[in-house]
Amino acid sequence: MIRRRIQLLIFSILLLLASCSTVSRLPEGELLYTGTKRVVVADDTPAPLRDEAVGEAKVAFVSPPNNALFGSSRYRTPLPIGLWAYNAFVDDSVGLRHWLFRAFAVQPILVSAVNPELRTEVAENTLRNFGYFDSRVTYHTDTLADGRKARLSYTMLLGEAWRYGHVEYLPMTPGIDSIIAATRAQRLVHEEDQFSYASLVGERNRLFTLLRERGYYYFRSDMLSIEADTIQQPYRAQLRIGLQPQVPTYALRPWYIGNTHLSLLGDTTRAEPIRPEVLAPRILLSRGDAYSATAQDATQRDLYRLGVFSSVTLSYVPRDSLTNSDTLDVYITAMLEKPYELSLEANLTAKSNEQVGLGFVASLSRKNLLRMAETLKLRLKGSYEWQTSRTLRRESSVVNSFELEADASISVPQLLFPGGYYYHYRWPVSTTARLYADWLNRGGYFRMLAFGGNLTYAFSSSTVLTHTVTPFRLTFNTLQRTTPRFDSIMTANPAIGLSFRNQFVPAISYTIVYDNTAHHPRHPSKLILALTSAGGLTSLIYAGLGHTLRETDKTLLGTPYAQFAKATIEACRYYRLAPEQVLATRLIIGAVYPYGNSRVSPFSEQYYVGGANDLRAFPLRGIGPGSYHHAGRYAYMDRTGDLKLEANVEWRFPLTGQLHGAMFIDAGNVWLLRSDDARPGSQFRWATLGDDIALGTGFGLRYNLKMLLLRADVGIPLHIPYATSKSGYYNVPHFVKGLCFHLGVGYPF
């Protein structure tokens, strides 16, 4: 009965809104703006920069109307709910109608507010910047049949584009003239090029940067003069590039680096807070070198990247007087950060297996203890979970779950290997050594201890490429205790049992990340390739001792060790549809292949799907591998695989203020590479790939707090990869029970 009343209320509200006019509340004499009808370019005279000029001029006409489709200035959605709500409830200040107004109403966009006169002026100025000095832009208001709405049309008449005539560089000084002559091939303005304000500004900035790199410390870009003569020849601008009058003489000569003075502030307990060999490679201003803005920026950047300074400033003082001296003494002042940093984090979790729990993470960092700008970090993580199921609470042998993890790491902003410490690296680098131990207890099933360590090098080879190399990683996993219930699961599925066995995991790995976000903000992309090999080097050592590579049951210190090869590639591409609308896409392909000593890869190296950052229409480890399905409280243990395929598409759009929305589609699954009789349907086969792919959609909200983004998603399954009580591709037995709710921090990809 209550549901029918709610449905009737919603229907009544929609009917009321639909009966409202979208123009009844317009001020007298105003027109409702319904978009841009067309933009006509009346002159089609070819020119090198014509398309670019037209494209930039059209930006001035971009003005989305009410209920615009994907931010379009031309197309609208058929239901102007915001206008309906505005006209229906604008006079209501209390009650349900006021709430509906605040929730849905959008103020009408008027033609006068769009201001087409100003937009045509902006477009004309843009065309002039490309040499179209005779251009003319007009607009026309197309009033619709009811006389209260209108669309705008724009017409651009370009005319003939002006070009550069003779380009002359006036004499400045012998030194500057020689620098300009030596870089003639790099000039940005040439005779017969189309006139462009951007090329003029670019040429002036090029000369300024060039002189600053050659020691002209006091030279400024506004000291250059560019004059254009448009009288001598029609549609040709004669250029003269020279100096402004009365430029100071000290700005027209190169300056050279003298003495460098370094002051470290903030740590008075030691006379030498940081070792000289750490700082020396990062100070790129050498005595006798000409001043260079690049060397200055690199020095400041590299010192700051050490991670122990809160600020780094450089200042220059000329020796003697400005008229006689050509030497600059450099003064570097760096403020040391506080050496200690403590962070505490607590969280509350609720899982689908009816367990809730508390967790904490505590970390203590000590910077620069060894005076190498290193960071020593101690971290302790713990969690405790208890079963909420009444059935289990009645059992006398219930043991709750807990996890305790401790690790210590030291990170140095340098590549520590023979001959590499004193080298100056252009991009950020680091060497990190880590030791850890993890004690895990799953109540009523098993208790496991894992400990190990690794050595990792991280470096960048360009602004878009980052590399991470781990030449040594050794982990030891051991089951300390199991219960009969866990043993029965392992007996029924020997493959899973092998993944939990006591074993060493000696591995090496390499990860490369390509990220061009800084260079392509409109359509950025990211590519991650991760490669891992375990046991390969150990087997080569065995082979050197006379063992064959195909030999199985090899041990390390009397314990079997894992052998597998793993590769994962993740590709993301982002398309900016409008200023605040993004279409985000992701594709993941991963495979792990156990061999030699291992028929099954370690449980921690296997793939799974589902959850807040994956297939959001399914719970974490809710499906897979393949079409295999086993229901049960601890079924997550056999929902892993050797192969993973996943694809995601998400449309992100603004709602109001800092609240954004999202609609998404996720597809994927995991499979086994080898057959497993205990898990029928789990092996990857091309013939069943279409049915094995889980498909889901959904929507979500994102609340952007600038420093933090909170995310809530509702996943709706469309196809479950295993057989259900419902036939057909849409085989979700119950719509409401199939919904998945997820909370997260940050974007899923």
Image (tube, helix red, strand yellow):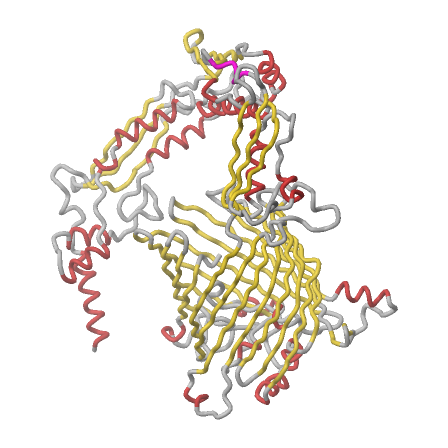
Q: Position of residue 498 (x, y in %)?
A: 67, 78
Q: Is residue 651 above or below residue 36?
A: below
Q: Is residue 2 magenta?
A: no
Residue name at image x 51 percent, y 11 percent: 166
In the picture, measured across the screen, residue 98 lies left or right of residue 151, that is left
Q: Position of residue 264 (x, y in %)?
A: 55, 42
Q: Residue furthest right?
A: 546
Q: Is residue 668 above or below residue 108?
A: below
Residue name at image x 38 percent, y 61 percent: 699
Q: Nearer the viewer, residue 72 or 344?
A: 344
* Magenta stretch in the rendered image: 247-252
Q: Position of residue 38 (x, y in %)?
A: 32, 35
Residue name at image x 65 percent, y 72 percent: 602
Residue name at image x 21 percent, y 50 percent: 83
Q: Position of residue 104 (x, y in %)?
A: 23, 55
Q: Nearer the viewer, residue 567 or 269?
A: 269
Residue 237 visible to the viewer = no
In the picture, measured across the screen, residue 108 lies left or right of residue 210, that is left
Q: Is residue 585 above or below residue 235?
A: below
Residue 616 visible to the viewer = yes
Of the 4 image quadrants, the one containing the N terminus is bottom left
Q: Secondary structure of the magenta portion, mostly?
A: helix
